[in-house]
Image (tube, grey):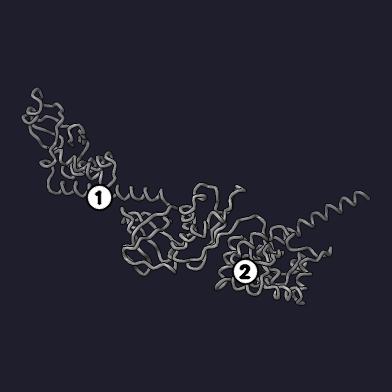
Amino acid sequence: MSSNFFEALHQIATDKGIPREEIEQIVESAMLSAFKKQYGSIENVRVSFDRDNNNVKVISKKMVVKTVRNRSEEISLGEAQQIKKDVSLGDDITVEENPLESFGRIAAQTAKQVIIQKIKEAEKNIIFNEFTGKEGELINGFCQRKTRDAIYVDLGRTEGILPAREQSPLEHYKTGDRIKALILAVQKNSKGPSVILSRTHPKFIEKLFEMEIPEIYDGVVIIENVVREPGMRTKVAVTSERDDVDSVGACVGMKGVRIQSIVRELEGEKIDVVEYVDEMKIMAANALTPAKVIEIVLKSDGGVIAVVDNDQKHLALGKGGHNVRLASRICGFDIDIKTEDQYREFLSSSDSRAIVEKLFRKDDDETPLGELPGLDPRTIKLLETGGIFSVEDLVEKTHEDLMKIEGIGEKTARKIMDIIAESVDFEEDDYEEGSEEEGDGE
């Protein structure tokens, strides 16, 4: 086969980013498919690549016969002697085939289709592997077209999809606009790799901070958590193991220059950078930024009450409650906002006083729910809301009583009953053992 064909193969390999060895495998597969289509068998055929002379050869092994009945496996004595003079009838001889002469129209078409199909598959695999390795990274592209459900982004070698659910409500793009996004996932489908993009995922915020703030890129400042309501507000908790580094100040930058570049990328979305600490009270106060907190009071259910001035309540709650929701999420526990007046009223009200007394009663005959093994804080809170404040109260309730409490379904009620049963069995065993010991002592 001509050197032009060989050079064309290498040009395709270069343009598509396909390794030369893989292109040669594709051509070999196509040639063998065409040969089989023409002659029905490829057992005596191989494809050889002569890289020194830029040539591709199809070589078959044939038997020298007087009368040819099967051209794929036999060759006449006269033809064989033109290749090798001292050949005799019954000998095997290696023959270089000319595909242009050997293959018919259908076989040639088969070879063409195989090459095109295999090259497309190879290109898809290369793109898939390339982008799979970039999951979780930022990428730049251009808005190619928009539909109701997604924006299609030109990424160069392939097309990315930015679904509506991964778009911020503040952002609007038109064809040709630059789009920076996170590669969220890469999926295989019949049309090629599907690159799913996101501009709402917390990892997108992390990568923007890493790109704009050298201390984060170098690992001096660490992002502990990111929570976000796209289009409304983002909260980022940061810390540093070095005492001489102000983690929040490093992220905000001189006069807010660093954080403002990220705010611009998010089309003006508010960003709160707060210091992450393990102590609940301090963390809750930090998380409620920009509101100023007077006092943080720990609750028995694992949450806190944040007491604020009257003029700070709106800031603490945020529009539609988004600020306190995000603060609770970034802390990992519930935060209840109350003004000073509301907190005093809460403590002075007869109902609240009864609850407080019930919760913190030290009587020997009352066991707090928290001492019941296996009962999580969320379930305890639901039980207390339903008027159950002690283990003694709880053991008197039936499965049906528990299901009447708002937030407790059949599954949770059954779990509570199992916990009670296990606890009661354990206590009875302890009592019986104790009785036996006392009896022995007598």
Image quarter hosting the N terminus: top left
> Going by the picture, which residue comes out furthest to the front?
255
> Going by the picture, which residue comes out furthest to the top?
86
- The residue lying toward the viewer, choosing from 316 and 185, is 316
Q: Position of residue 239 (x, y in %)?
A: 58, 53
Horizontal arrangement in the rendering, residue 19 relative to residue 224 (left or right): left
Q: Residues within 10 Å of mark 1 (few under 14, many from 20)?
A: some
Secondary structure category for the residue under label 2: loop
Q: Give the labeled residue for mark 2.
A: 409
Res 117 label: 1
Q: Are marks 2 and 1 in contact (CB under 8 Å)?
A: no
Give the amino acid at mark 2: Gly
Q: Position of residue 168 (x, y in %)?
A: 44, 66
Q: Position of residue 291 (x, y in %)?
A: 61, 68
Give the amino acid at mark 1: Gln
> Going by the picture, which residue comes out furthest to the right?
442
Mark found first going from the N terminus, 2 or 1: 1
Specify whether residue 143 is in view: yes
Which of the 4 image quadrants contains residue 360? bottom right
Secondary structure category for the residue under label 1: helix
Which of the 4 image quadrants contains residue 176? bottom left
Residue under the image location 71 percent in, 65 percent down? 297
The CA span between labels 2 and 1 is 56 Å
